Image (cartoon, rainbow, N blue to C red):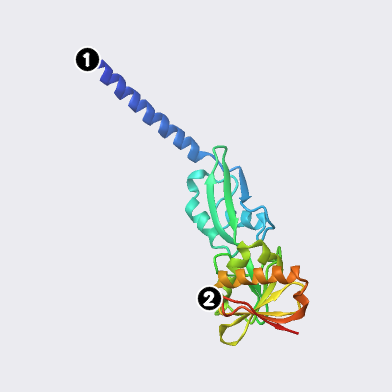
Amino acid sequence: MKRSLPYIKAGFLLVLVVFLFGFAEKRHSARKINDVKVHFTDSENLYVSEEVVNKLLIQNDGATSGEGLEALDLNRVESLLNAHDMIENAEVYLTLDGQLAATVSQRKPIGRAIGNSSFYLDRQGKVMPLSAYYSARVPLLTGFNEKNVSEVYPLLNQVEKDDFLKKHITGIHRLPGGKMEVHIRGCDFDVYFGDSSRTVLKFNNFKAFYKKAQKDEKLNTYKKVNLQFGDQVVCTKK
């Protein structure tokens, strides 16, 4: 009997743990959602408001204040948020005190197409609709549509990563044949970029040219700067 006592105690403790776990789980499931909390990962301006996210969280039987936790499908609520045009990624979870929380990453525009159709191109190279809440200060794209806008993504992606280019490039125009022209802030000359090949090399050459011409006070003496050859900058004077 003494030998079996430890096994009896262990069995009793196991049953007790299972009972307490089941009891706690049942109590947790019976609890009500008492609040909805939204956190945006970006500190920048919002392209989708907290109010809109809250509405998405509570619509279509997603999560209503006072609803039991057992009735909530977090995966479905999360999918609902991720389907929104302005949201790049959303994670939905429940807190111990009964809050339904969502951590939201917005899509980030890096260029804005204007013309017959207006839209953004985001940092992943995807078309993004304009926002009713905020207008992004990004390079303007002309001559592009939703079918050919992917051609300009390598340029915009490089501009987004470079503070010098972000400061000086105001727009990109698409020429026939997929060639591109870059507009520079405060300069009279046109920058012929050519196609999107060797983007990093072309921009590095342009930066070197610009800084040298600015130092020599010759920026206003050019009417055209050609970067299409990649390994050199060809300039035409006025």
* Secondary structure found at label 2: loop
Displayed quadrant of residue 179 = bottom right
Residue 205 vs 22, above or below: the answer is below
Residue at position x 56%, y 51% in the image:
63
In-image side of 234 versus 185 (left or right): left
Displayed quadrant of residue 95 = top right
Residue 11 x %, y %: 29, 24
Whether residue 198 appears in this view of the structure is yes
Name the residue furthest front.
216
**Residue type highlighted by circle 2:** Ser
Residue closer to the observer: 157 or 74: 157
Residue at position x 57%, y 46% in the image:
100
Residue 131 x %, y %: 67, 66
Which of discs 2 and 1 lies nearer the camera? The answer is 2
Residue closer to the observer: 235 or 174: 235
Residue 31 x %, y %: 53, 39
Q: Disc 2 versus disc 1: distance between alpha carbons? A: 80 Å
In-image side of 49 versus 92 (left or right): right
* Secondary structure found at label 1: loop
In terms of sequence position, does the residue under pointer 2 or pointer 1 come before the other? Answer: 1
Whether residue 121 appears in this view of the structure is no
Q: Which residue is mark 1?
A: 3
Q: Which residue is mark 2?
A: 197
